[in-house]
Image (tube, rainbow, N blue to C red):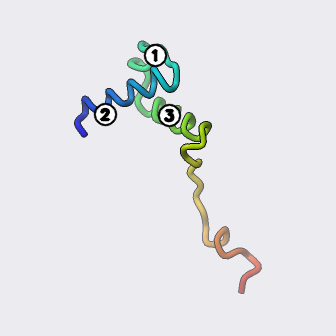
Amino acid sequence: MSDAETFTRLYYYATVQMHMVVDDFWLMPIGLFLDLFACHKQWHGLERPHRELTIDDIIGEDWG
């Protein structure tokens, strides 16, 4: 996917899906927009929040 196609998709997500004003999208740092987009997807159930697990979370402290 080219850069132009990527920004077209991001522009669509911002203006149509997230109801942002066009100027707000273009003036916003890309990292902030991607964080907001991740929150938007979590809110709608399309993505789960990232969670780091340790070995104790998987096995448990009572094992062994």
What residue sits right under mark 2 in the picture?
6
What residue sits right under mark 1 in the picture?
24
Q: Secondary structure at mark 2?
A: helix
Give the image location of residue 25, x and y in percent. 43, 20
Q: Callout 2: 10 Å neighbours few (<14), some, many (20+)?
A: few
Q: Amino acid at mark 2?
A: Thr
Q: Earlier in the sequence, mark 3 or mark 2?
A: 2
User: In the image shown, does 34 or 5 lie closer to the viewer?
Assistant: 5
Disc marking residue 37: 3
Q: Earlier in the sequence, mark 3 or mark 1?
A: 1
Task: Name which residue lies at 31% across and 33% down.
Answer: 6
Task: Name which residue lies at 61% across and 72% down.
Answer: 55
* Spatial CA span between label 1 and label 2: 18 Å
60 left or right of 35?
Answer: right
Q: How many marks?
A: 3
Q: Is residue 38 above or below residue 15?
A: below
